[in-house]
Image (cartoon, rainbow, N blue to C red):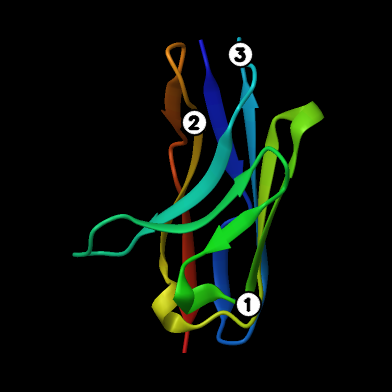
Amino acid sequence: QVQLVESGGGLVQTGGSLRLSCVASGIISNINAMSWYRQAPGKQRELVARVATNGTSTYTDSVKGRFTISRDNAKNTVHLQMNSLKPEDTAVYYCNIKRLGPWGYEYWGQGTQVTVSS
């Protein structure tokens, strides 16, 4: 059984930083994409950042220059370094892993709360 365990969420003031981590355990291999999504109250879940196996990363416009995603393939771990946090970054953040192709899969973490106070 595959599990994604997230950590690092919490309460921080505007301008502060947090580092989210997600460890994937279980029988998994060849993860193509590791991503962070977020969902604020009353809003749809949105993609925040994604990193491919080769390290290529993409970000939603609102976090470019402030957030950095990274992954450790050997440890099936993905991190999200969040700097210069704003109140609008407040949301539940979810880790996601995906493998493409005929033996593909997709898994989600349970979510971790990030709250940025003004």
Q: Which residue is mark 3?
A: 26
Q: Are marks 2 and 3 in contact (CB under 8 Å)?
A: no
The residue shown at (51%, 51%) is 36
Mark 3 residue type: Gly
Q: CA distance from mark 2 to mark 1?
A: 24 Å
The residue shown at (67%, 43%) is 78
Task: Locate residue 97, reporting x and y percent.
Answer: 52, 34
Which quadrant of the structure image shows residue 104?
top left
Task: Locate residue 9, reporting x and y percent.
Answer: 57, 57
Instruction: Say whether disc 1 or disc 3 marks the residue closer to the N-terminus.
Output: 3
Q: Tell me the mark number nearer the camera, choosing from 2 and 3.
A: 2
Q: Residues within 10 Å of mark 3 (few under 14, many from 20)?
A: few
Q: Residues within 10 Å of mark 2 (few under 14, many from 20)?
A: some
Instruction: Say whether disc 2 or disc 1 marks the residue closer to the N-terminus.
Output: 1
For this view, does 61 lie left or right of residue 50?
A: left
Mark 1 residue type: Arg
Mark 2 residue type: Lys
Q: Residues within 10 Å of mark 1 (few under 14, many from 20)?
A: few
Q: Which residue is mark 2?
A: 98
Which quadrant of the structure image shows residue 85?
bottom right
Q: Tell me the mark number nearer the camera, choosing from 1 and 3.
A: 1
For this view, does 38 lie left or right of residue 16?
A: left
Task: Give above or below for 11 relative to 103.
Answer: below
Tell which of 67 and 7 is nearer to you.
67
Q: CA distance from mark 2 to mark 3?
A: 14 Å
Q: Which residue is mark 1?
A: 66
The residue shown at (60%, 15%) is 28
